[in-house]
């Protein structure tokens, strides 16, 4: 597809609905499909189409929508929800402000996440080529129930009729309204006070724009999207799951094409921005999200969550939870390991069962095999941690760092009370609580002297 620059046009996203049937305290459009709010999908489709001026019409829990948007685009408030045309009327100021620089405005539903760049761009091409005042984006589907039907007269759109207002013959029509339209801004502004609410739902229907424009002698057209998925929305959690499943299957298919191997898809969910190298193997119960990148020939899972991490080639992560961290190539982690944010695990490192690493750098070929906490630490190369070591990084008021130099050997059950430095090649004796730096190549030992009470157990038995 040839990309055209849509910057001289703008868009309004209708997002005031409450989504009662979602039974969620969130505004409907913030319910998520594949880890991203439906509104995010729509915003990205607009932004990726080159639309720069965007306005979201918010209503139900609008503060939450505003907070989510964080100044990313304009907001218009629709405090009473009186229909889709009424929602557009609330954005009149936005339309006026952009009427000098933009020719056309795209109106979209914030709860139809699969609207895409191709449809937006191709519909605009038709809209401008035919010099339409309005071009409605439609799809042809087998089960049109619930959608507005596209009524045509000699192949030209003559009206959109809502399900509740449709005659029996109109109900059979399979071409339906996606709820997205391109309008000439000047035309839309000039008809805003012509909508009426004399229909079965007593709402101001944006769909009436077709007949209003045709009655004035204007041009109306319909663009049928190639991919009927663009009309899909969700009113309840079941429909939301359906969208999630569609998005998820599409992502997994892309990875199949790229040569990623899935041993089972049970519980496997992969976000749409995730990149996975060829011949990586993904086991059951693996969730990979955010901007994660997984290298070639890596083996991920089972039962692993990777959120916003880079993982190199040939690394193995089994039953790991890893967040906002970098894991290099040829690393072996798991089972039951938590890699918390801001950690960097270099190549050749081995991290075994019940280990937590947080905000730490672990250099090449270091081994942290069992039951250990490494937090706020800079650990060198070829360091060996015995079982059950703890970097004591928090004294109740402040966090401090632990520095462990190359080839140090941390004995089992060592506590390293930060701030503290263990020198290069130095040892700590098992069971020591180390509060002072250990120089290079020294042994740090901190233990009581053992005394044995001869016959103690036998004396107890006689009592
Ligand atoms: C609308 C269309 C229908 C189309 C369908 C596609 C009308 C009258 N009907 O119906 O032809 O097939 O979308 O999904 O337009 N909204 C507001 N304020 C309101 C009402 C709605 O912001 O007062 C927003 C909703 O949050 C939603 C979008 O507009 O994002 C569509 O509203 P919805 O109530 O779902 O319209 P439908 O009845 O589905
Ligand atoms: Ca809808």
Image: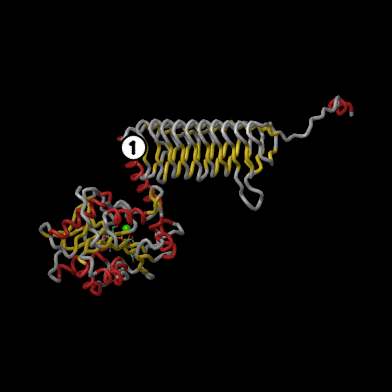
Q: SS at mark 1?
A: helix
Q: Look at the image and tell me whether residue 175 can be seen.
A: no
Q: Residue furthest front?
A: 440
Does residue 159 appear to the left or right of 388 in the view shown?
left
In the image, residue 231 above or below residue 216: above
Q: Residue at x 43, y 64 (%)?
A: 61
The percent position of residue 450, horizontal first and vertical second, equals 79, 30
Between 232 and 291, the residue placed more toward the observer is 291
- Locate residue 308: give its quadrant: top left
Q: Residue at x 33, y 69 (%)?
A: 82
Q: How is the image coloured?
A: secondary structure
Q: Is residue 356 positioned above or below 367 on the image?
A: below
In the picture, which quadrant includes the C terminus?
A: top right
| Residue receiving disc 1 | 255
The residue nearer to you, when weighing 397 against 292, is: 397
Quadrant assignment for ligand 2? bottom left
Residue 447 point in image, percent of width and height: 74, 34
Q: How many marks?
A: 1
Task: Report whether 359 appears left or right of 152.
Answer: right
In percent of width and height, residue 38 lies at 36, 54
In the image, what residue occupies the spot 15% across and 59% down? 152
Label 1 neighbour load within 10 Å: few <14, some 14-19, many 20+: many
- Report x, y in % for residue 353: 56, 33
| In this picture, residue 224 sits left or right of residue 351 | left
* Left or right of residue 352: residue 394: right
Outermost residue, right side: 463
**Where 191 falls versus 51 (above or below)?**
below
Q: Residue 106, can we see it?
A: yes
> Which picture quadrant has residue 385?
top right
Residue in the foreground of this view, choosing between 372 and 58: 372
Q: Is residue 400 above or below residue 351?
A: below
């Amino acid at each position: 597809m040839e990309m055209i620059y849509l910057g001289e046009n703008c868009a309004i996203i209708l997002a005031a609905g409450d989504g009662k049937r979602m039974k969620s305290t969130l505004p409907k459009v913030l319910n998520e499909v594949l880890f991203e709010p439906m509104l995010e999908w729509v915003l990205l489709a607009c932004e990726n189409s080159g639309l720069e001026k965007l306005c979201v019409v918010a209503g139900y829990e609008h503060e939450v929508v505003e907070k989510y948007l964080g100044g990313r685009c304009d907001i218009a408030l629709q405090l009473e929800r009186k229909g889709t045309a009424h929602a557009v009327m609330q954005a009149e100021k936005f339309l006026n402000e952009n009427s000098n620089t933009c020719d056309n405005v795209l109106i979209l539903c914030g709860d139809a996440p699969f609207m895409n760049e191709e449809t937006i761009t191709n519909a605009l091409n038709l809209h401008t080529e035919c010099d339409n005042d309005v071009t409605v984006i439609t799809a042809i589907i087998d089960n049109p129930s619930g959608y507005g039907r596209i009524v045509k007269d000699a192949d030209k759109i003559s009206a959109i009729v809502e399900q509740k207002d449709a005659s029996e013959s109109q109900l059979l029509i399979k071409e339906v309204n996606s709820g997205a339209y391109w309008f000439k801004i000047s035309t839309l502004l000039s008809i805003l006070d012509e909508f009426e609410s004399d229909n079965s739902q007593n709402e101001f229907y944006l769909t009436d724009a077709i007949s209003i424009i045709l009655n004035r002698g204007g041009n109306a057209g319909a663009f049928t999207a190639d991919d009927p998925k663009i009309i899909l929305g969700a009113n309840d959690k079941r429909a939301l799951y359906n969208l999630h499943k569609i998005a998820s299957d599409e992502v997994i298919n892309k990875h199949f094409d790229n040569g990623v191997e899935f041993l089972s898809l049970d519980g496997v969910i992969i976000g749409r921005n995730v990149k996975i190298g060829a011949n990586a193997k993904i086991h059951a119960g693996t969730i990979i999200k955010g901007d994660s990148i997984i290298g070639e020939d890596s083996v991920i899972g089972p039962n692993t969550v990777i959120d916003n991490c880079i993982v190199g080639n040939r690394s193995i992560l089994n039953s790991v939870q890893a967040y906002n961290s970098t894991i290099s190539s040829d690393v072996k982690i798991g089972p039951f390991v938590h890699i918390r944010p801001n950690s960097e695990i270099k190549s050749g490192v081995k991290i075994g069962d019940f280990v937590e690493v947080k905000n730490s750098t672990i250099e090449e070929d270091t081994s942290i095999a069992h039951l250990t906490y490494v937090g706020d630490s800079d650990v060198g190369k070829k360091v060996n941690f015995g079982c059950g070591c703890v970097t004591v990084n928090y004294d109740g008021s402040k966090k401090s760092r632990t520095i462990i130099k190359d080839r140090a050997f941390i004995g089992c059950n060592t506590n390293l009370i930060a701030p503290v430095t263990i020198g290069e090649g130095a040892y700590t004796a098992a069971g020591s609580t180390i509060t002072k730096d250990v120089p290079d190549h020294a042994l740090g030992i901190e233990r009581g002297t053992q005394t044995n009470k001869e016959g103690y157990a036998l004396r107890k038995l006689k009592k």
